[in-house]
Image (tube, rainbow, N blue to C red):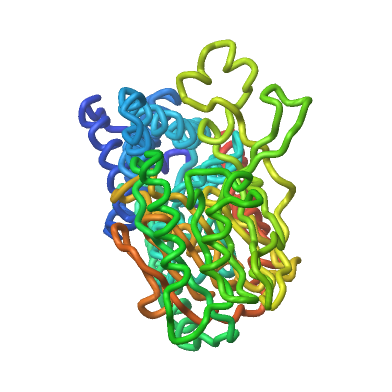
Amino acid sequence: MTDAAAPTDRPAPRRWGWALRILLALAAGVLTAVVHPPFGVLPGLIGYPLLMVLAERSRTVRGGFWMGWLAGFAYFGVGCWWVAEAFLVNPAQAWMAPFAASLLPAGLGLFWGAATALHRRLAPVGVVRVLTFGALFCGMEWLRGHVLTGFPWNPAGAGWEAGSAPSQFAAVVGVYGLGLVTVLAVCAFAPLVVGGGTRKGRIGAAVAGAATLVALFVGGAIRLSGAEVRSTGTIVRVVQADVDQESKWSPEAYRDIVQRYVALTARPGPRVPDVVIWPEGALPNTANAVLAEGAWEAGAIAAALQPGQTLLAGLSRGEPDPDAETGGRYFNSLIALRRLPGREGMRIEAVYDKYRLVPFGEFLPAGALMSRLGVRSLVHVPADFTAGPRPRPLELAGLPAVQPLICYESLFPGFVGRSTDAAWIANVSNDAWFGRTSGPLQHLNLASYRAIETGLPVVRATPTGTSAVIDPWGRIVGDKRLDPGESGVIDAALPQALTATPYARVGDLPWLAGILICMLATVAARRRREDVSR
């Protein structure tokens, strides 16, 4: 009799006390959370098989849901507590910090709860239950990255530090595919420990899991062994002025902030940079005011640039729109400014408007309804930003084509395809909102996965850290990094892009195929079990 067909293969549920089950679920969430940077505790991967077993040994589907929700709450509580820091910037909003730090994990935990509830409902037996859990869990992870524009923070695959050997498999299957492979590999050891299925099946699953993990390390090491960074000859300068978010809005500090950016832009170096990059929200003013004719800021910026030099500056901007409720539309933008050779002044070469906006940060979902309910005043979003057109590279004079990603956009796998002619990614972000927490470090790790997936180098600029130049394998180039609290510039030769990776060509199709195969195996096993029981 096969593993899948045996109706008695499922281990008998133990009557674990409710307090123990709650503690174990919370432990599963914490363990999987500390796998991610800046912790890097890889043994925490044991949290995934622990969660699978907790779901299976729940007496009801509802109990299975609560196991997943509790684990998810702990996971996102550890991974996303830094969101509270943003509410401490404005004392008037500080009272919201505990709610932000608890409601976000509570909402995101619903995806984990749905996965474990479905796993308990399907009640797979034998080693096939590993495939069922992996498919359901990673399917819900994908949904988390898409519902309500999505929040793909710390997906399972990103637990491997970007640039490490295991992370290289994201070039083939993306971070979601890497997550599926990782969850399946570590959960494959669970039947060997807790029982279920034949002895041969349990041993086979464990061997397959171990072989998969070894393959991730060995295959990635082989890829990295031939990873030689080649230069395009284009020199980039990243400016990090170390301007705390809470100090930005002081009128007396405004001139000092502008002068900081200008001085760092004009700082002498071994070579004159071809392009200078300022972070998102670099100046606490709109581009309309900063670049207005006769504005002192525009004159100072132009004087800091060399003739023919390009500045990519993260600034908000507005456009009049009589049909809009506020009389205008507002954009979070990356603006390309070029100092004219042999002339005074500069001109706007191109504008990229952020396409993927942050819900409750840059726009209010169901805005009209939320405004009537008073939510808009609570979250202090007086007017929504407008989403720009679908992303496409900017073609700038004298530079390789660049694909901008503004802050939140760098979280999304597949956001930058290789059907375009982009040669590099400019990622600007305002991580100053989150201070010296784990948030900026995790954001760096997630943004670095876009380099692995696409084979494009990423140049990342933030106001307070972490800014870096990242090669196409997801590694920080040499010492080209400015950490939180540091002020300065990074001058680096832009790395050359790789040929399009498999993931850049086909996207999440391998991940989808893996999910379908796992679920088909589940259905087939269930039918065989029903046939035997007749």
The answer to whether residue 437 is above or below residue 160 is above
Of all residues, the one furthest to the right in this rendering is 323
Q: Nearer the viewer, residue 337 or 137?
A: 337
Nearer-the-camera pick, 233 or 320? 320
Residue 310 horizontal/vertical position (percent): 61, 69
Determine whether 313 is above or below 24 in the image.
below
The number of numbered badges drawn on the structure is: 0
Quarter of the image for residue 204 reads bottom left
| Residue at (36, 26) in percent of width and height | 93
Question: Looking at the image, is 437 positioned above or below residue 42?
Answer: above
Q: Residue at x 73, y 34 (%)?
A: 320
- The quadrant where residue 362 appears: top right
Residue at the far top: name it.
Answer: 372
> Closer to the camera, 127 or 356?
356
Which sits in the foreground, 76 or 216? Answer: 76
Q: Residue furthest front?
A: 294
In the picture, residue 481 is in which quadrant? bottom left
Task: Point out residue 236 in the picture as x, y percentages from the top left corner.
Answer: 53, 75
Q: Is residue 1 visible?
A: no
Quarter in which the C terminus is drawn? top right
Residue at (55, 39) in percent of width and height: 358
What percent of the width, then of the height, locates residue 94?
A: 31, 27
Residue 194 is situated, as x and y percent measured from the top left of the image, at 30, 47
Query: Can residue 418 be spotted in the picture?
Result: yes
The answer to whether residue 169 is left or right of residue 251 is: right
In screen coordinates, is 324 left or right of 530? right
On screen, residue 209 versus residue 31, left or right, reads right
